[in-house]
Amino acid sequence: MKILVLALAAACTLAGCARGPTQRQEADRRALAEARPVGDPVDCLDIARIDHTRVRDGRTIDFFMRGREVYRNRLRHECPGLAFEDSFSYRTSLSRLCSVDLIHVNRSGGGGPAGPACALGTFQRIETSVR
């Protein structure tokens, strides 16, 4: 009986049923649910104004700007590996990041080829209390 209980506990742990969402996952869910759009979407952001970014899921990235504005980008399609890797890069010859640009998922461990390329959508300014 003791072996059966241990086997079930191990199987549950491996399947992920023993743990709930992390604080980060919960914050991302709240940020997605409570965001309110402000104004019309824009096609580009000035790169020099981007303070940091936050990957919310496999299709959503929030861009936190200097001056406390937040712009949400809904990628045109789900980006494989983006949510898992939680990291991306981009290359542009302009001083702006635009909806016609691609991002590349950064793979863990680096050194290998860039991950999938994914097309950005427009940037929607949002208001949210979740950072």
Image (tube, grey):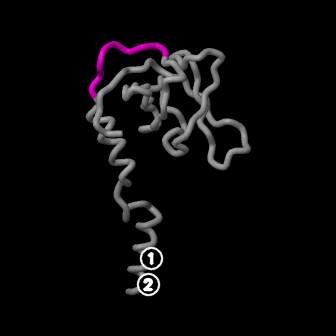
Q: Quadrant of residue 73?
A: top left
Between the residue at mark 1 and the residue at mark 2, the CA separation in whole angstroms equals: 6 Å
Give above or below for 14 relative to 62: below
Q: Nearer the viewer, residue 17 or 57?
A: 57
- Tell me the residue at 60%/32% (across/down): 89
Q: Position of residue 6 (x, y in %)?
A: 42, 79
Magenta stretch holds residue 63: no
Q: Amino acid at mark 2?
A: Ile
Q: Amino acid at mark 1?
A: Ala
Region of the chain picked out in magenta, as a range:
36-44
- CB within 8 Å, label 1 to label 2: yes
Q: Position of residue 112 (x, y in %)?
A: 72, 42
Q: Classify mark 1: residues with Cα within 10 Å, few (<14), some (14-19) or many (20+).
A: few
Q: Nearer the viewer, residue 80 or 96?
A: 96
Question: Disc 1 marks which residue?
Answer: 7
Q: Position of residue 4 (x, y in %)?
A: 41, 81
Give above or below for 65 relative to 30: above
- Tell me the residue at 47%/23% (across/down): 76
In the image: residue 86, left or right of residue 17: right
* Secondary structure of residue under mark 2: helix
